[in-house]
Image (tube, helix red, strand yellow):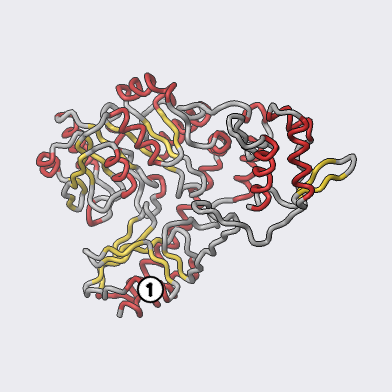
Amino acid sequence: MLYDFIVIDKNKKTPLYRQIYLSVRKSIEYGSLKKGIKLPSIRRLSDDLAVSKITVKSAYEQLCAEGYIINKPQSGFYVEAYFASKPSPDGLMKSNENPQKKYYLYDFSSKSIDENIINIKEWKKYVKDVLNQNYLLSSYGEPQGEELLRIALQKYSLGVRSVNTSASNIIVGAGTQPLLHLLCSLLGKNKKIALADHSFIQSEFVFKSHGYKINYFYSDKYGAVIRSLDRIKPDIVLINPNFSGSSNANMPVTRRLEIIEWAKNNNAIIIEDDYNGELRYITHPMPSVQNYDNENTVYLGSFSKVLLPSVRISYMALPDNLIRKYKKIKSLTNQTASKVEQIALAHYINNNKIDVHLRKARRIYLEKSNIMLNSAEKYFGDKAKIILNETSLYIAIKLKTQCSNDILNIIEKNLIKIMQYNKEENTLVLSFSGINDNKIEDGIKLLSEIIK
């Protein structure tokens, strides 16, 4: 046990024994030191605080006299007092606060995945195997990401997304946001970036924090339109080729090549956010944009929906010119992803468990997407345009009649949680990633009755 809660200042006029007494007393009153906890011996505490044994003994005797602690012969000093109603100093959060999570009967948010996809016991086994290797836990992780995982990711991304890179060009991080922060530090501040409207909101926060000027390019059914990029003239273009324009279709190869050519001619960088690119289950997955251009394209991949949301591991494949810049600052960076989970994921990939996992995920999400589409068409019919975003695991219901202003409150009162409501486009967005398939139809039926 550490005793940092005991604060003393030898320059103060307050006697040292009194300072020790007050520190222990406050910790007991606030519940930090609970009844039955053993305190350090007089000798141990006097050594740790570099004070005399008489000073510590005087503090302990005062605490014993007031009933805060008790001296058990041949055993030591123990906390005796218990405060059912603890003092609440300003600015301190109460340790006993336990807000309850609201229950939703129909959860169409995107905060979870289908629990039937992954074998949790098997994943825990891989994590446990790493935890049992003490030598792995006694050192810091690699700033760039564990080499074992980067080698596995190079093979994995090539196999499922045709990413053309090497392990030495891959950087691992705890989610896409930390990687984007690192990327912005390599690209420099005050850049102009073009991206699709209503895209990755968290990425916009990162770009704004680095002083980037954000512009929204125009999209047709095939994705970003070149003449729109000509008008904006950005330094960076962020695209998600799995989610093109209003059609939510896969960006065709002709448009991909046009954007690559435009970027080369305009000395621009492409950031390819390949969110869940390997999760296509209706259409056949196309190679990543990075496959056609590894000189100007930065590739971003993630396991938040592919594996588990709680496993915060994403990765970034950089072109050679940017990885050279990174290596100059590598020693100044820290790894944000868990070393244990990185190594566990590497073994999970190398043992082909991720392949089994992906096949199962594609089958389950295919079934759920069909239920979602059929239910939406059944209960909304010609009153809405229904669009499936395959890789992001949601449908968009674009209503033809305007909803009331308090529609979200009404939906909430009926214990329905939606992913979002776009008021400008009068569109409900419903994710099927986490909801049980036997609840989908009833939830959409109730939602349609509320809208009507």
Q: Is the C terminus in the top left, top right, bottom left or bottom right quadrant?
A: bottom left
Q: Amino acid at mark 1?
A: Ile
Residue at image position (73%, 40%) is 59
Exactly how many numbered labels are in the figure?
A: 1
Q: Nearer the viewer, residue 313 or 73?
A: 73
Compared across the picture, whether 6 is left or right of 170 comes to: right
Left or right of 231? Residue 1 is: right
- Hey, which residue is sitting farthest front in the picture? 13
Q: Is residue 68 left or right of residue 90?
A: right
Drawn side of residue 213 relative to residue 97, left or right: left
Q: Measured along the vertical axis of the image, is residue 238 above or below residue 107?
A: above
Q: Quick one: 21 or 362, which is closer to the camera?
A: 21
Measured as percent of width and height from the top left, residue 424 is found at 21, 64
In the depicted structure, whether residue 233 falls above or below residue 358: above
**Mark 1 Cα shell of 10 Å, populated few (<14), some (14-19), many (≥20):** some
Q: Quadrant of residue 127?
A: top right
What is the quadrant of residue 109 in the picture?
Answer: bottom left
Q: Is 392 located above or below residue 103 in the figure?
A: above
Quadrant, the N terminus: top right
**Residue in the foreground of this view, choosing between 197 and 242:** 197
Question: In the image, residue 421 lies at what x, y percent?
Answer: 31, 65
Horizontal and vertical percent position of residue 351: 58, 37
Q: Residue 61 at what x, y percent from top left?
A: 79, 43
Say what secondary structure mark 1 lies in.
helix
Q: Name the residue tied to disc 1.
A: 411
Residue 84: name its quadrant. Answer: bottom right
